[in-house]
Image (tube, rainbow, N blue to C red):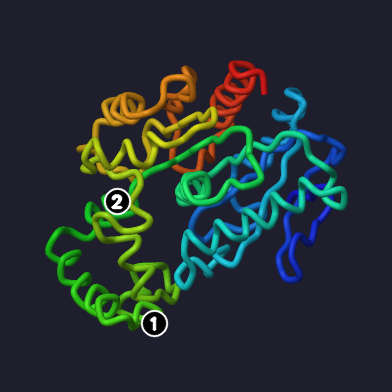
């Protein structure tokens, strides 16, 4: 086991964020994990702080209502509220009066970052990193097949249409979520085309992408694992990145965006982590953050 030095911030009455040593940086990266993630569960976070320190940034990881198994009964909107609360705290004197803040999302955390930028950002984050921004919907269909996928969607969609989105689905559904209880709303958000979580699917039309990724108005880096196991092999990752770039505002899309060579979804291997750290470092230098 590894021990980490730092400070645990209570940014709301019942939510915390961990800041890795050293804790005196007025520029910080706020790391947001994906589904099932909480503090210190993403492998590449272990050495990320050291890499960021060389660029003058500290590292903070947020814990939210949706952390660990909370994602099944939460939403991107609730995550955005938690992120906003943390950023407000970090900008305050009590939270260290941070001068610059970069949001970094891993997996579904990338959806959180994009959703926050599109719906909140009242406190002015300076940049964003989207790592492992794959489609939950396309990964699920690839795993279970079109027939099972279509059958499973009938009940949750009906419940949402009837205004019963908060209703918990049966164990038939939670088993596909690793045993995590899931509401009809969250299922539809993740699994239906055009759902609230459906930001990164390859079959979205150009106009839709222009209204999401195309609306990002701060510098951002897209770091896509080359052999992400949750992305169907039929998807051309390079072509997908080029589509996103073509829909983006040129001055904000990082030229350092691209594939993380040899990278799996969580970047468990040190060499792929190092590759990612270099991408982030160059991104920070590119925009003089």
Q: Which residue is mark 1?
A: 168
Q: Quadrant of residue 234?
A: top left
Above or below, 151 relative to 64:
below
Q: Quadrant of the C terminus?
A: top right
Asked whether 208 or 70 is in front, the reply is 208
Q: Residue at x 66, y 18 (%)?
A: 288
Instruction: Give left or right: position of 87 versus 121.
Output: right
Instruction: Give left or right: position of 83 versus 163.
Output: right
Q: Residue at x 66, y 45 (%)?
A: 123
Above or below, 105 relative to 54:
below
Q: Residue furthest front?
A: 122
Residue 252 percent location from the top left of the image = 49, 25
Q: Which residue is mark 2?
A: 139
Label 1: state its secondary structure. Answer: loop
Residue 15 percent location from the top left of the image = 71, 65
Label 2: state its secondary structure. Answer: helix
Q: How far separated are the C-alphas under marks 2 and 1?
A: 22 Å
């Amino acid at each position: 086991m590894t021990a980490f030095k730092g400070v645990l911030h209570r940014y709301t009455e019942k939510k915390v964020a961990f800041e890795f040593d050293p804790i005196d940086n007025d520029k910080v990266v706020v790391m947001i994990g994906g589904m099932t993630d909480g503090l210190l569960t993403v492998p590449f976070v272990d050495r990320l702080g050291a890499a960021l320190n060389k660029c003058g940034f500290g590292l903070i990881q947020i814990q939210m209502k949706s952390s660990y198994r909370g994602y099944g009964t939460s939403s991107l909107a609730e995550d955005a509220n938690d992120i906003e609360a943390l950023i407000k705290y970090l900008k305050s004197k009590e939270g260290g009066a941070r001068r610059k803040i970069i949001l970094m999302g891993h997996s579904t955390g990338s959806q959180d970052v994009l959703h926050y930028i599109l719906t909140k950002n009242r406190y002015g984050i300076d940049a964003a990193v989207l790592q492992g921004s794959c489609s939950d919907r396309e990964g699920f269909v690839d795993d279970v097949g079109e027939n099972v996928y279509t059958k499973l969607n009938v009940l949750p969609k009906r419940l949402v249409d009837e205004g019963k989105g908060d209703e918990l689905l049966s164990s038939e559904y939670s088993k596909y979520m690793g045993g995590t209880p899931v509401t009809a709303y969250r299922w539809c958000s993740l699994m239906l085309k055009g759902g609230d979580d459906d930001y990164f699917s390859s079959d979205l039309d150009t106009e839709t992408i222009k209204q999401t990724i195309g609306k990002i108005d701060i510098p951002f880096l897209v770091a896509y694992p080359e052999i992400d196991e949750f992305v169907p092999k039929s998807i051309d990752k390079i072509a997908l990145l080029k589509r996103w770039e073509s829909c983006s505002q040129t001055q904000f899309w990082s030229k350092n965006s691209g594939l993380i060579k040899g990278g799996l979804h969580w970047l468990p291997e040190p060499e792929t982590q190092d590759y990612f750290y270099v991408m982030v470092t160059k991104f920070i230098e590119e925009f003089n953050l």
